[in-house]
Amino acid sequence: MSIGKSMKDLQNEVDQYIGQFKEGYFSPLAMLARMTEELGELAREINHFYGEKPKKDSETEKAIEEELGDLLFVLICFANSLHIDLEDAHNYVMNKFNTRDKNRWTRINSENGE
């Protein structure tokens, strides 16, 4: 497991991996379908671990960490295929949360819940 990779590093690593295959990235619609599939697998694991639906004896054990990793890989593929810098996307959304939603939630260090 590598420590200290930036999002740009992750995007480059995935791009190098995909770049070695003639097929390249899937189409945006196929990528969305893959992302939905991976999200469903994550939801299933969350439901088994935290929900009321235990695994069947015949079902293999998968870790939530593995499913999150699969979802992250597909998300990075999706962003790369559309030439989206995920660091820029993250910065955009954090700016939105820090401005538009700055008073939406109760801060831990708030004296009067302000």
Image: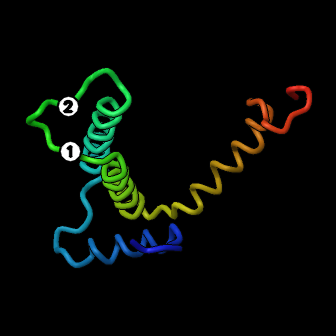
Which residue is found at the position 24% from the left and 58% from the top? 26
Q: Residues within 10 Å of mark 1 (few under 14, many from 20)?
A: few
Amino acid carrying mark 2 in the image: Lys
Decide if residue 112 is on the left or right side of residue 6: right
Decide if residue 54 is on the left or right side of residue 82: left
Disc 2, SS:
loop
* Between discs 1 and 2, the one toward the N terminus: 2
Count of all numbered marks drawn on residues in the image? 2
Q: Which quarter of the rendered picture does the C terminus lie within?
A: top right
Residue 72 location, x and y as percent? 39, 55
Which residue is found at the position 39% from the left and 71% from the top? 1
Name the foreground residue: 27 vs 47.
47
Q: Residues within 10 Å of mark 2 (few under 14, many from 20)?
A: some
Name the foreground residue: 62 vs 40.
62
CA gap, disc 1 and disc 2? 8 Å
**Residue on which disc 2 sits:** 55
Give above or below for 52 relative to 90: above
Contact between labelled residues 2 and 1, with CB atoms less than 8 Å apart: yes
